[in-house]
């Protein structure tokens, strides 16, 4: 069998959220060695979409963009599209939610991240409409973003790679700070947590706060604890 992921591979996944997207025209891949190794060998950037089955805006973005043939063509041709269930992989969600918080000041689901083939983020956000809409403020259209980065990767990738390196360094620093804060910081009786420890007042629902995480843009693993921010379901 070829190692090239030429089709949507979510049909055999255990996650109900992932199998919901098995019929999308987007050639979704699970987060696994096959997809990640293909991104590096093909020298294609990754588009990572993180969500969960009960997320309203995840379904909205799927209907607007991931079921659209024009969007699917640009994702399939210029990116390695990877879909992750946050409930199945909270470790990955924590890592990329952290960079979303650092860059945008917030976060939530669906989480949309554009990555280098090595997994370094260079653009991040949550829900994007298919095309720019005045009623949603200055939010750019998802199709336009993908087209822009597809062109930039071919013609001016050094700028994207430079940004990715800077973001990866900032992310590593924040992960280390959060690890120390999780160990040293006490939460008061009123539930308040200092701003340096979390980006919002919602604490992480997972009890395994020091799970070992494997992240693609650094050899080895890191013990981190990251609190997820408020979801986009509002």
Image: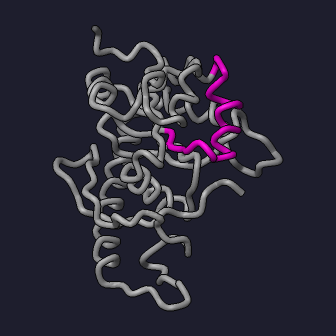
**56 in the magenta segment:** yes
In the rendered image, residue 219, in percent from the top left (x then y), is placed at: 17, 47
Would residue 113 appear left or right of 165 to someone viewing this image?
Answer: right
Q: How many discs mark residues in the rendered view?
A: 0
Asked whether residue 173 is in view, the answer is: no
Residue at image x 63%, y 30%?
143
Would residue 3 appear left or right of 187 to someone viewing this image?
Answer: left
- Name the residue at the bottom extreme: 189
Looking at the picture, does residue 195 appear above or below residue 100? below
Highlighted range, magenta: 49-70
Residue at image x 27%, y 30%?
33
- Quadrant hosting residue 210: bottom left
- Name the residue at the right extreme: 135
Asked whether residue 39 is in view, the answer is: yes
Would residue 108 appear left or right of 159 to someone viewing this image?
Answer: right
Looking at the picture, does residue 16 appear above or below residue 110? above
**175 in the magenta segment:** no
Nearer to us in this view, 25 or 23: 23
Nearer to us in this view, 96 or 16: 16
Nearer to us in this view, 24 or 65: 24
Residue at image x 34%, y 78%?
181
In the rendered image, residue 94, in percent from the top left (x then y), is placed at: 41, 56
Residue at image x 36%, y 37%?
116
Nearer to us in this view, 52 or 145: 52
Looking at the picture, does residue 197 appear above or below residue 125? below
In the rendered image, residue 18, in percent from the top left (x then y), is placed at: 51, 33
């Amino acid at each position: 069998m070829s190692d090239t992921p030429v089709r949507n591979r979510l049909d055999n996944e255990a996650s109900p959220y992932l199998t919901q997207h098995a019929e999308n025209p987007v050639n979704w891949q699970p987060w696994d060695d096959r997809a990640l190794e293909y991104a590096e060998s093909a020298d294609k950037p990754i588009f990572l979409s993180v969500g969960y089955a009960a997320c309203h805006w995840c379904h909205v973005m799927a209907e607007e963009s991931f079921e659209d043939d024009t969007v699917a063509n640009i994702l399939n041709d210029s990116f390695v599209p990877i879909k992750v269930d946050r409930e199945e992989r909270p470790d990955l969600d924590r890592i990329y939610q952290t960079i979303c918080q650092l860059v945008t000041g917030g976060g939530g689901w669906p989480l949309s991240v554009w990555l280098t083939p090595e997994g370094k983020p260079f653009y991040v956000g949550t829900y994007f409409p298919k095309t720019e809409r005045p009623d949603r403020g200055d939010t750019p259209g998802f199709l336009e973003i993908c087209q822009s980065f597809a062109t930039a990767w071919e013609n001016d990738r050094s700028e994207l790679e430079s940004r990715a390196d800077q973001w990866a360094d900032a992310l590593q620093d924040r992960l280390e700070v959060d690890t120390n804060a999780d160990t040293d910081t006490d939460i008061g009786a009123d539930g308040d947590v200092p701003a340096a420890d979390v980006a919002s007042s919602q604490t992480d629902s997972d009890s395994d706060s020091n799970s070992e995480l494997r992240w693609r843009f650094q050899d080895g693993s890191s013990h981190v604890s990251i609190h997820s921010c408020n979801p986009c379901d509002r």
